[in-house]
Amino acid sequence: MGKVTAVLGLQWGDEAKGKMVDYLSEENDIVVRFNGSLNAGHTLYVDGQKYVFRMLPCGMLHKHTIGVVANGVMVNTNVLIEEIKSLGLGPERVFVSDNAFLVLPIHKEVDIFRETGKKDFKIGTTKNGIGPSFEDKVRRYGVRLVELQPSNKINLENKLMNITYNYWIKELGYGKNPINQISHTDLEIMVKELINELHEQYEFLKPYLCNTALFLNDRINKGDNVLFEAAQGALLDVDFGSYPFVTSSNCTIGAVSTGSGVPATKIDRVIGVTKSYTTRVGNGPFPTEILETSEEAEIIRKTGNEFGTVTGRPRRVGWLDVPLLNYACMINGVTELVMTKFDVLQNIPQAKVCIGYNSRMNNIGTPQEVMYKNPAPYYVELSTSYIEKYLTLLSRYVDAPITMYSLGPERENLHHRTQT
Ligand code: IMP
Ligand code: MG
């Protein structure tokens, strides 16, 4: 049996998981994306060059690894094809689940409409159409890659007509006023054009498609080591995060199994990744947030380059939140904890750490408590001069063993702790 490892984010995404995945890819044969979509942007710096991955697993940068895009990933065919082509990858290197669903241009349009329109309730999404595409999946109108085969054309046309009608006419209000007149024929033409494009893309993708659940289980049984690379983080999980300010899929350990067909009983290691501070993009509660205009926030944002990979938005920044971290470790069953970007925190000689809500006695918190009870963070201040000393002190409050930390963006800036 091969070993199965999962790398998961423990905060609101952007924990620098990409670096961990890149490092662990050395000892793995297959790297798998199982959740999220192109809302995730994994950035890697190798030999001074910057790489951004949005659809493919970033562990693909190693020449020996096979990349899998499993069924839990919402696939944007344009971006997937672009990434495969730009890295020059053949079908022997990339396996894409034919069961994966598509995020369509209309999904993006409606996401943008909701986020920029007059509505007073906004999530602050990445505007890539992720929410609407998952809505269609759940209402059983989602389009899977396997449905793009030409023999399925009539079914596909009916589905796309329904999806387009649902959003264009009902939600966006096209056809309801003289400026936005759109006839049934216009809709049909649009759908036909989309189908032609999707059929062309299907021809390109066909050699890459398979049932990845069968593929992965078979390879694990034959001894291959497999690494699961998560998008986003526990606090953005649609079930366990700060709902409704979350993404539309699961980002916690259960998603490894539902998003790939590799059962929970096969997972050997669960590596949780946290920054030494906290960031969040988009709206929603953030108990340890530092006032945006304060000097400390400026220092962290600038030195940590805390701007969205996908959207370029400045990220909100705050102190490490141990109660939420402990919650994320519990939900995920984290066996090893990695702390990234300590070099950034070192620009602040005395850093605050929230070790409880309301009092230090309470060192586990929940996103629901944060949403509805507005708890006051209880802080301690720790000197950031010596990393080992800092981590030893921090370990008193954190429920999982901190085994690694990083002091910069390059591969060689990742360090193992000598004792935990
Ligand atoms: P959506 O996933 O684009 O629908 O966005 C929903 C929420 O999740 C927003 O607050 C986004 O900023 C956040 N989000 C989605 N993907 C990421 C990510 O990869 N990193 C950080 N935040 C993300
Ligand atoms: Mg990111």
Image (tube, grey):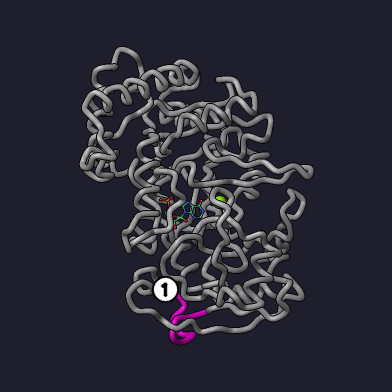
The answer to whether mark 1 is within 8 Å of ligand 1 is no
What stretch of residues is rendered in magenta?
A: 355-364
Q: Residue furthest top?
A: 151
Residue beneath the point at 68% across and 64% down: 302
x and y percentages locating residue 190 in the rendered image: 33, 25
Residue beneath the point at 25% across and 45% down: 171
Q: Looking at the picture, tell me which residue is in the foreground, 391 or 204.
A: 204
x and y percentages locating residue 313 in the rendered image: 55, 57
Q: Is residue 417 above or below residue 23?
A: below
Decide: few, some or many residues near mark 1? Use Cα within 10 Å; few <14, some 14-19, many ≥20: many
Residue beneath the point at 42% across and 70% down: 285
Q: From the viewer's perspective, is 43 left or right of 219?
A: right
**SS for dot 1:** loop
Is residue 223 part of the magenta span, yes or no? no
Q: Would residue 375 be seen by someone viewing this image from the given angle?
A: yes
Q: Residue furthest bottom?
A: 359
Residue that label 1 marks: 365
Identify the image quadrant of residue 272: bottom right
* Overall secondary structure of the magenta section: loop
Identify the image quadrant of residue 144: top left
Q: Which amino acid, by three-letter code, is at mark 1? A: Gly
Q: Is residue 221 above or below residue 109?
A: above
x and y percentages locating residue 335 in the rendered image: 53, 57
